[in-house]
Image (cartoon, helix red, strand yellow):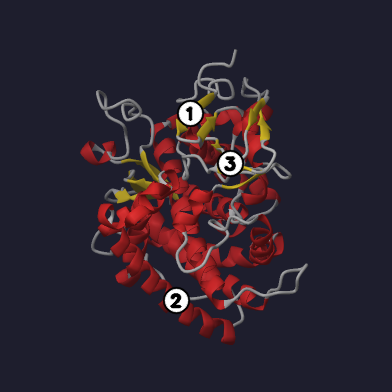
Amino acid sequence: MLPAGDFVRYGPNSLLVNTAKGLHDIYSHGKNFKKAQRYGAMVHRAPNTLTVIDKNKHGKKRRIISQGFSDAALKTHEPVILKQVQQLKTQLSLDDAGRQVPSGLWTLPKNMARLGDYFTFDVMCNIIFDIPWSTLRDPTYRFVPDVIEKSNVRVGTLAQAPELTIFRLDKLLFPEAIRARDKFITFIDKVLGEGIKAAGTSGKGVFATLTNAKDPETQQPLRMRELGGESATLIVAGTDTTSTALAACFFYLSHNRSAYDRAATEVRGVFRSPGDIKMGPSMHQCTFLRACIDESMRMSPSAASSLWREAEEQGATVDGEYIPAGVDVGTCIYSIHHNPEYYPQPFSFRPERWINDEAHKVKGDVALARSAFNPFSIGPRSCIGKGLAYVELQLTLAHIFWHFDFRLALGEQGLVGEGKEGAEFGRHRADEFQLEDHLTAAKHGPYIEFRSRA
């Protein structure tokens, strides 16, 4: 007998598997699965690394794009990130009139969903195109994160119900999302022009790397149309997912005082000055900070639903069950992240579950928790920017803990992002950061107050 809930028929020809063994059988390297045909409904202009179905074509694209996110590349990206972190810290210390709030006084509440969007958008534009935009300071391009979120309402629906493209029903159902997509495409066309200029002058940025990069095996470069599609995907993924993870960290740390105190003490003890806060051995000592990041992404993953795969010819075996060829299979990230078999007390924020720590009497199996953890997916289709996201999150939170105390806003604003008692199931937990899944996540809040440390 199968445990109830491990295998669930989600829809016609669609099966969800909620086990770690199933997760690895579906997504790991060398498995007899490919991206499901439903990703074809998401293609616009040209397939990219997210939507391309053919494994060989995907491998070619990924080998080229990964050159912009290698360990060596991350070292060159770190100063760019730190510059944007400084911009964020400046915004967190200002009042609504743009004046510096004196040290020791609390700021008015800051919407960390929006500030996180602007911050991560700035990081991605600077890293990809070497364009020194700052939506944190200048509102000119603040519409972009908003249109990304609106456009993703349609894209996320098509990922689950691609049949809506028949007779172009999606145009009737999602007119606002399509208008948002068109506005985003206009922006991408503009930024590509800027990126081409920057690549020709500074030669910096991922885009410049990609224009000169070739597939190590075929020696073929990406075409300009492909570069546009990949750049758009990187901006969307790099903005939405990291900003959601950052907002989730602020939500859970502000709702869990003991975790907040331990993370703050750790950061302020490891780093003697803000100039010391960089990636390296000292950052690796901040094990509890990293645990808070992982636990926030477990509780409220930026991409929460299933990333569908289709069983190829001859079928495949998933956790002991045969899957016929042509069947779509996947693991819902939110579901497995809350499976009590891997995460005891799955709806409780417990960063300690990620640390083998006798001193704090931590109970739990870290290896078991890791086996089901996949906020960036796993295998050959995993997020190519995973390393960059961790660098952003660790640097940002470490700098903020060093420079500020922070707390949840008082009154009604402090409730934004929480579930509500009596709401529908899944929306009823006040201590769970509420997200709306549209391929990536839409979020609101939390509202956080900051106080500069002397």
Circle on res. 26? none
Please name the amino acid that badge 1 sits on: Arg
Mark 1 sits on what residue? Answer: 9
Of the pair 230 and 107, the residue shown nearer to us: 230
Is residue 266 visible to us here?
no
Name which of mark 3 and mark 2 comes first in the sequence. 2
Which type of secondary structure does the marked residue at label 3 adopt? loop
Residue 417 locus on image (x, y percent): 32, 39
Q: Nearer the viewer, mark 1 or mark 2?
A: 1
Residue under label 3, please give it.
Answer: 326
The answer for how far apart the CA atoms under marks 3 and 1 are is 15 Å
- Quadrant location of residue 300? top left
Q: Residue at x 43, y 42 (%)?
A: 248
Measured in 3D between alpha carbons, the distance from the residue under mark 1 to the one under mark 2, in whole angstroms, is 43 Å
Disc nearest the viewer among 3 and 2: 3
Front: mark 3 or 1: 3
Between 327 and 145, the residue placed more toward the observer is 327
Q: Which mark is residue 191?
A: 2
| Position in image of residue 252 (x %, y %) | 43, 36
Q: Label 2 is placed on what type of residue? A: Val
Measure the alpha-carbon separation of dots 3 and 2.
39 Å
* Residue under the point 35% across and 57% down: 151
Q: Earlier in the sequence, mark 3 or mark 1?
A: 1
Q: Is residue 294 left or right of residue 45?
A: right
Category of crowding for the residue at label 3, using alpha-carbon neighbours closer than 10 angstroms: few (below 14), some (14–19), many (at least 20): some
Instruction: Describe the element under mark 2 as helix, strand or loop.
Output: helix
